[in-house]
């Protein structure tokens, strides 16, 4: 009788070879819930700006698992006692940390399921998988929830210098080509230690931490909050909003069965029954793109035009500025859009809208990145660093945007 070899080696363009070191990890990766991440893009619609950014949440999760394995090995070498059971739990927790992402990741986080974060849905998935695998995920879930007595383990999974951030910065930089985001993750891993149940970076790694924080800031402005990406993701949410409105008004809309279910129902955290979770697990980017391809031919002008903007990459103009646009300016833009497009002013809100984006590279109010000096005293990287710009990077920067159709530029100057 043949048995499957579950101890596999995978080839990754970032780290080289990634090892699946436990049969349970293999079984989790093979599960349909996890395989779905192959169909969820890591950077949403950023590929409309950076053509190479087509990598997926599947890539990212495997990368996180790999650097978790490397970090555990380094910590053990430095005398930190981590059992085989704890190591496996850490790998499971980081492998599944993003399993709750819906189509196009953050772009549609509250559009498909309202008021439920992807972290909440990840936990619901993990609880379901724990039943499937007879309680073998219990310790991983305990760590993920922050209920395990060894607090540094949660910091490995969720903190300002965790495996998640280390992988997505390096990976997103590689696939987008935004070189400023390329961090030295191997150096950071080698500098990890534990002091007083806190995850710390040894003093000689402080420059790598500074580079990490600066890289995060640059990646947000150049990639994640690139104005064209922001415009595309906003249009995506407007499309779904319009489709829902049409359904509510009794107008026929075609979409896949799982997408139609979530457009017809308002799902809260309490509504996530096993049946709803199963339906959510069938949702991915292809449901959205497939629907939009069809909706570009819909008889409703608003839905059709918005859909064409994504399919043909004919996106609206977006202007980022330090001050909020005045009500009068936005109202005038909507009036002109209404006139130019031949639609009611209430529908012009789908084409002319405003909002804000915020970038904070380091949150000094949150769990700090701890630097451990040679005498084993520990302090916040902001205090330990001689770089004054780190203090500046800890302040949130808010930019306001106003979005409107390009053809309005052909008229009087705005």
Image: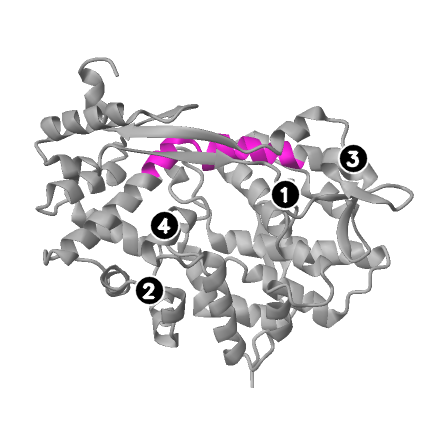
Residue 370 showing in the rendered view: yes
Residue designated by label 3: 384
Name the residue rendered at 17%, 48% in the picture: 295
Q: How many marks?
A: 4
Assign a secondary structure to mark 2. loop
Query: Reading the chain from its start, which is encountered first: label 1 or label 2?
Result: 2
For this orientation, the residue located farthest to the front is 327
Q: Which mark is residue 267?
A: 2
Q: Position of residue 231 (x, y in %)?
A: 33, 34
**Does residue 220 belong to the magenta stretch?**
yes
Query: Reading the chain from its start, which is encountered first: label 3 or label 4?
Result: 4
Nearer the observer, 396 or 294: 396
Q: Position of residue 40 (x, y in %)?
A: 41, 53
Please state if 364 lies on the left or on the right of 201 as rendered: left
Distance between mark 3 and mark 1 Cα atoms: 16 Å
Query: Reading the chain from its start, which is encountered first: label 3 or label 1?
Result: 1
Magenta-highlighted stretch: main secondary structure? Answer: helix
**Does residue 63 belong to the magenta stretch?**
no
For discs 3 and 4, the disc positioned in front in the rendered view = 3
Residue designated by label 1: 365
Query: Local crowd at mark 2 within 10 Å, few (<14), some, or many (≥20)?
Result: some
Assign a secondary structure to mark 3. helix
For this orientation, the residue located farthest to the right is 375
Name the residue rendered at 44%, 40% in the picture: 53
For discs 2 and 4, the disc positioned in front in the rendered view = 2
Residues rendered magenta in the picture = 212-232
Residue designated by label 4: 108
Distance between mark 2 and mark 4 Cα atoms: 14 Å
Query: Local crowd at mark 4 within 10 Å, few (<14), some, or many (≥20)?
Result: some
């Amino acid at each position: 009788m043949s048995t499957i070899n579950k101890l596999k080696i995978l080839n990754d363009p970032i780290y080289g070879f990634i090892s699946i070191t436990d049969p349970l990890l293999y079984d989790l990766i093979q599960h349909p819930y996890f395989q779905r991440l192959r169909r969820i893009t890591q950077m949403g619609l950023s590929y409309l700006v950076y053509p190479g950014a087509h990598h997926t949440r599947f890539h990212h999760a495997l990368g996180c698992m790999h650097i978790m394995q490397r970090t555990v090995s380094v910590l053990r070498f430095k005398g930190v006692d981590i059992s085989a059971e704890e190591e496996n739990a850490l790998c499971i927790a980081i492998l599944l940390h993003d399993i709750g992402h819906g189509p196009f990741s953050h772009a549609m986080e509250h559009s498909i399921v309202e008021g439920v974060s992807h972290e909440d849905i990840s936990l619901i998935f993990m609880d379901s998988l724990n039943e499937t695998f007879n309680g073998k995920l219990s310790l991983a879930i305990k760590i993920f929830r922050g209920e395990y007595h060894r607090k540094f383990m949660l910091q490995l999974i969720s903190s300002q210098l965790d495996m998640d951030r280390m992988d997505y910065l390096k990976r997103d930089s590689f696939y987008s080509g935004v070189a400023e985001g390329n961090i030295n993750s191997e150096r950071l891993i080698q500098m990890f230690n534990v002091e007083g149940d806190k995850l710390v970076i040894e003093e000689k790694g402080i420059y790598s931490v500074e580079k990490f924080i600066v890289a995060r800031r640059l990646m947000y402005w150049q990639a994640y909050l690139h104005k064209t990406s922001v415009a595309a993701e906003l249009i995506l949410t407007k499309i779904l909003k319009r489709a829902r409105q049409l359904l509510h008004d009794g107008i026929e809309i075609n979409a896949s069965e799982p997408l139609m279910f979530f457009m017809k129902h308002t799902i809260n955290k309490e509504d996530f029954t096993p049946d709803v979770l199963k339906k959510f697990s069938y949702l991915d980017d292809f449901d959205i793109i497939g629907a939009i391809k069809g909706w570009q031919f819909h008889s409703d002008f608003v839905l059709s035009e918005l859909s064409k903007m994504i399919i043909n990459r004919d996106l609206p103009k977006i202007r980022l500025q330090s001050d909020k646009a005045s009500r009068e300016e936005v109202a005038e833009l909507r009036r002109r859009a209404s006139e130019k497009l031949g639609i009611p002013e209430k529908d012009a809100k789908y084409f002319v809208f405003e909002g804000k984006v915020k970038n904070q590279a380091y949150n000094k109010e949150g769990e700090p990145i701890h630097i451990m000096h040679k005498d084993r005293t520990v302090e916040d990287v902001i205090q330990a660093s001689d770089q004054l710009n780190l203090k500046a990077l800890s302040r949130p920067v808010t930019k306001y945007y106003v979005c409107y159709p390009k053809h309005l530029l052909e008229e009087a100057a705005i």
